[in-house]
């Protein structure tokens, strides 16, 4: 009996090894030749309907002029998140050439996997990025000093408010007092007490690593005058600015102005919350549903709008190492981020191209669409998530401690910030 | 030169008297090896090395790191918490599953009318996707959900799913309810093997309904109980969907995160599949130990 099992095991092992051999003979890492190779390429677009419209038009324009280097575009395949799908595609070796939805927080991880091509490898690569995005480009450099992503477009987050609800709560709907923390809290109290809305504002109180970008990080960018979460390898938020922001949100949760339970859906579009922290991508979503206005995120003592920074919520484009025709990919990348295509992007999606002086370059469009003008002004002062090792683990550690101290009030806010800052600094220093 | 007889005997000892049987069984053995044995082996390998996923052809060092990944996993408060959470889950879920499914199966067995309807009714949640059923439970247990509206002033504060004491019990009850149909089916099959004569003898001896349930039914289905306990433990230890969807990522504040959920965070989201693999190996060992203890306790006689 034992011998039979042994035989079966040997056969199985033999078959498994042959199977493994036949599957591992595929792609190998793209060498220098891929960098200059030209030919057809595949690109992925996000699932946002406006971005798909822009993407298809861009691809059509490219293909008409380059019949030998055809681009085929598709939406990112469905999955829990785009980053998981892209990560799996990198591991499997079938990532497309370009993904027009690369999250800056995922770039360090993709780079570590060997999944990205440094754009500096192309002639004039770094210069092109710096010329297009100006000083903001530096936030997108990886720790090795190279660009593994092209900063593409931002969605600077601001406070949307529901004008009808403000009116119902007895607040001036054209200029609601929301500039300082004291104003913001008083306005929120009026909204909830008057029954105008169930919640003053409803940031997702859930534990996903990226949720802190909207509630904490946007206000921290403003309060700190544009600091990133980590600078020069050290966490910056264990500071008066970080404490002020965290304590402001603690009050919002403690006074039940922001709910601790998640809302399944869009609380602002569904008229459950009077305010929301979102970028301009949401304007088409709210159209016809909410009579909205927009103001910058609050700061403790109030600041002029022209001095307020916020979280960029950017999505970028990267060239993936599985790409065989990287020469074409780079040309398409430049074509799709030209001034004309960026204008088309702004026109179709309302999202802000990450280039210097959006407000002046596209002045005529913005004059015709005043609701986007505010966001274009804000786009000049955005803060990105830091491009550091273990980026996602850092944000998860931050979120866990924020959830415990700020949202649920289980641990003291200030000491949590201190201990999390130490943990975050350690994580950023690890390979 | 070896005589042909000896060689054929050696072949017989190697492949059995019916070598064809081996060939027929081979596809399933290959399936098992590729889908279960190979990944498990790889997970054990990953847990002892510094490992992260890479694009094909990328050469990286994967040095042996001994127990470092295990140390990293076990010293992480989030991991410790997730194991405590899943123990709390099992303590509620497994006994509740055994008691409810046995009681419901034996009453279903003696029910005369509506038997098919009831069987289907119990089975429907089991075959429905968690994602769909979770929406119903959110509707029931959210702050302004139906349960709280019925309870009125008795509603817990904070509400069920954001209450760190109540979130895990709600999930345990949800999973019990969802899987009940399957375990009822197991017990129904086992009940067919309990001889009618035993019930008759018990009733001659003057045993009431409760007494004959305790003295005839419960010992009669003991092998099924072992199976139910072990299966419920294994599925329970692999808890993922409910903390992911019902409490939005193991909330509130990690009170409902499970080891598999933490593995997902570390292995898939944060690019540390080596630490995730160590958590997985610890989980496998834990489940094996619990199953062995269960077997020893339940199969005593």
Image (tube, rainbow, N blue to C red):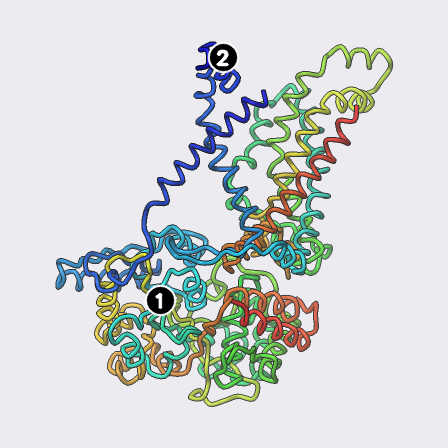
Q: Image height check: is A331 above or below B120? A: below
List the single residue furthest toward the front: B1
Residue bearing the label numbered 1: A284
Image coordinates for residue A265, horizontal then vertical, percent: 48, 59
Question: Which quadrant of the rendered structure holds the C terminus of chain B?
Answer: top right
Examine the rendering and report whether any part of residue A163 can be seen: no
In the rendered view, does A255 fall on the left or right side of A392? right
Residue at the spot 13% in from the left edge and 58% down from the top edge? A67
Distance of label 2 from label 1 (alpha carbons):
82 Å
- Report the disc number at residue B179: none
Mark 2 belongs to chain: B
Q: Is disc 2 placed on a helix, strand or loop?
A: helix
In-image side of A345 versus B135 (left or right): left
The residue closer to the viewer here, B16 or A246, is: B16
Chain assignment, label 1: A
Q: Give the percent coordinates (x, y) of residue B155.
A: 70, 55
* SS at badge 1: helix
Q: Examine the image and state in which quarter residue B216 appears.
A: top right
Left or right of A295 in this view: B300:
right
């Amino acid at each position: 009996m034992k011998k039979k099992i042994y035989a079966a095991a040997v056969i199985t092992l033999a078959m498994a090894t042959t199977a493994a051999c036949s599957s591992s003979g595929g792609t190998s890492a793209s060498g220098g030749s891929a960098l200059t190779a030209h030919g057809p390429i595949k690109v992925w677009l996000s699932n946002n309907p406006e971005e798909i419209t822009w993407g298809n038009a861009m691809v059509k324009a490219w293909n008409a002029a380059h019949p030998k280097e055809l681009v085929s575009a598709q939406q990112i395949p469905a999955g829990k998140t785009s980053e998981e799908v892209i990560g799996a595609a990198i591991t499997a070796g079938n990532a497309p050439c370009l993904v027009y939805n690369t999250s800056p927080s995922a770039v360090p991880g993709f780079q570590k996997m060997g999944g990205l091509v440094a754009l500096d490898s192309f002639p004039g690569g770094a210069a092109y990025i710096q010329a297009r995005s100006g000083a903001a480009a530096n936030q997108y450099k990886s720790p090795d000093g190279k660009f593994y992503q092209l900063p593409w477009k931002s969605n600077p987050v601001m406070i949307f408010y529901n004008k009808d609800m403000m009116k119902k709560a007895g607040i001036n709907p054209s200029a609601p007092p929301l500039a300082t923390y004291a104003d913001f809290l008083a306005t929120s109290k009026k909204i909830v007490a008057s029954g105008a809305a169930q919640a003053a504002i409803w940031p997702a109180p859930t534990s996903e690593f990226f949720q802190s970008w909207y509630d904490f990080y946007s206000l921290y960018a403003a309060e700190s005058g544009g600091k990133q979460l980590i600078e020069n390898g050290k966490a910056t938020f264990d500071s008066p600015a970080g404490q002020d922001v965290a304590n402001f949100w603690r009050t919002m949760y403690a006074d039940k102005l922001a709910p601790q339970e998640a809302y399944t859906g869009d609380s602002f579009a569904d008229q459950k919350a009077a305010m929301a922290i979102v970028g301009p991508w949401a304007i088409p979503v709210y159209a016809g549903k909410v009579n909205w206005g927009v103001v910058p995120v609050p700061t403790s003592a109030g600041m002029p709008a022209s001095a307020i920074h916020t979280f960029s919520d950017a999505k970028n484009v990267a060239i993936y190492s599985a790409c065989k025709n990287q020469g074409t990919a780079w040309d398409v990348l430049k074509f799709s981020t030209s001034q004309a295509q960026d204008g088309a992007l702004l026109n179709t999606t309302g999202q802000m191209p990450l280039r210097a002086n959006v407000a002046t370059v596209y002045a005529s469009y913005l004059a015709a669409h005043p609701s986007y003008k505010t966001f274009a002004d804000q786009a000049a002062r955005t803060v990105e998530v830091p491009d550091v090792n273990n980026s996602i683990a850092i944000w998860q550690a931050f979120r866990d401690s924020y959830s415990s101290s700020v949202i649920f009030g289980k641990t003291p806010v200030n000491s949590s910030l201190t201990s999390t800052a130490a943990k975050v600094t350690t994580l950023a220093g690890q390979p | 030169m070896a005589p042909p007889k000896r060689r054929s005997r050696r072949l017989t000892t190697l492949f059995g008297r019916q070598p064809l049987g081996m060939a027929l069984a081979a596809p399933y053995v290959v399936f098992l090896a590729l889908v279960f044995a190979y990944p498990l082996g790889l997970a054990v390998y990953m847990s002892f090395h510094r490992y992260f996923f890479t694009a094909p052809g990328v050469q990286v060092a994967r040095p042996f790191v001994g127990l470092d990944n295990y140390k990293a996993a076990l010293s992480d408060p989030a991991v410790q918490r997730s194991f405590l959470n899943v123990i709390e889950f099992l303590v509620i879920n497994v006994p509740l599953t055994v008691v409810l499914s046995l009681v419901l199966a034996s009453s279903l067995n003696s029910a005369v009318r509506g038997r098919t309807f009831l069987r289907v009714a119990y089975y429907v949640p089991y075959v429905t996707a968690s994602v769909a059923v979770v929406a119903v439970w959110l509707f029931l247990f959210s702050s302004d959900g139906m349960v709280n509206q019925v309870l009125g002033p008795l509603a817990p504060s904070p509400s069920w799913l954001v209450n760190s004491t109540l979130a895990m019990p709600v999930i345990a009850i949800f999973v019990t309810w969802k899987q009940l149909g399957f375990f009822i089916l197991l017990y129904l099959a086992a009940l067919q093997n309990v001889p009618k004569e035993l019930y008759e003898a018990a009733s001659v001896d003057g045993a009431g309904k409760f007494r004959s349930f305790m003295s005839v039914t419960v010992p009669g289905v003991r092998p099924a109980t072992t199976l139910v306990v072990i299966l419920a433990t294994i599925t329970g230890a692999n808890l993922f969907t409910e903390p992911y969807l019902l409490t939005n990522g193991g909330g509130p504040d990690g009170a409902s995160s499970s080891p598999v959920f933490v593995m997902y965070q570390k292995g898939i989201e944060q690019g540390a599949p080596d630490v995730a693999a160590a958590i997985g190996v610890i989980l496998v060992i834990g489940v094996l130990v619990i199953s062995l203890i269960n077997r020893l306790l339940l199969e005593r006689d």
